[in-house]
Amino acid sequence: MMKSMLKPIIAIAAAALILFGFGMSLSKVAAVNAEKELNGMLETLLPGNTSFEWEEYTGEDTAIQAVYKGETGFVIQTSAYGYAGDIVMLVGVSNEGTVTGLVVRDLSETYGLGANALTDTEFLSQYLNTAGDAEVGNNIDAITGATVTSKAVTRAVNSAVAYVTGADTTSSATSWGG
């Protein structure tokens, strides 16, 4: 009886080792591809830059997750809480403090409403060439039915610009009054 169980056990162990080996090699490929994708996005969000250095962020603004320094500015990874969860974005900001590009990387907002922030180019393009002092209702037209999401995106953009310009994020430039 022991002999009859030995072959399947060896086969299962060999298959597990093979799968583990493939998994390890594929994880390296996935990491390289993720880095290439990120670098492509950074170059798109801050045009004219081809190399970026990651900088450690030690400030108090909890919206800032990562900082990538280019020759002519920064790309800031931000996270702001929307209606249903965090909205993670990359925001390109020139050294002069103007938004050069932005992309929503991840969100959990309501389908058909706040989730439109992921693909609504008309909404997102309102932030381009601004100094990040915009507010929904004054300078930015919110996504219909998604005011909370729109305000979260604006807070994230304002945080990114404030990092580059040194603006006070507790000022009225980023307060929402409620």
Image (cartoon, helix red, strand yellow):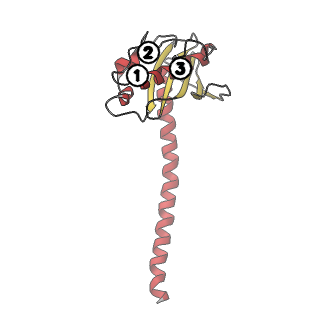
Kind of residue indicated by mark 3: Asn
Residue sitting at x 37%, y 31%: 115
Is there any visible trace of residue 85 in the rendered image?
yes
Q: Which residue is labeled 1 in the image? A: 147
Residue 136 numbered mark, or none: 2
Mark 2 and mark 1 lie on one chain; the one further toward the N terminus is 2
Depth check: give the residue in front, 89 or 111.
111
Asked if residue 142 is positioned above or below residue 4 in the image, the reply reads above
Kind of residue indicated by mark 2: Val
Mark 3 crowdedness (10 Å alpha carbons): few <14, some 14-19, many ≥20: some
Q: Is residue 116 left or right of residue 158?
A: left
Mark 1 crowdedness (10 Å alpha carbons): few <14, some 14-19, many ≥20: some
Mark 3 and mark 1 lie on one chain; the one further toward the N terminus is 3
Q: Which residue is labeled 3 in the image? A: 49
Toward which corner of the image does residue 72 lie, by quadrant?
Answer: top right
State the separation of the CA atoms marked 3 and 2.
30 Å
Residue sitting at x 54%, y 28%: 77
Residue sitting at x 40%, y 16%: 125
Is there any visible trace of residue 44 in the rendered image?
no
**SS label for mark 3:** loop
Asked if residue 139 is positioned above or below residue 67 in the image, the reply reads above
Q: Residue 19, position in %: x, y?
A: 47, 61
**SS label for mark 2:** loop
Q: Residue 119, position in %: x, y?
A: 35, 27
Task: State if disc 1 and disc 2 touch (CB < 8 Å).
Answer: yes
Count of picture labels: 3
**SS label for mark 1:** helix
Depth check: give the residue in front, 177 or 136.
177
Toward which corner of the image does residue 121 lie, by quadrant?
Answer: top left
Residue 138 numbered mark, or none: none
Q: Is residue 1 left or right of residue 59?
A: left
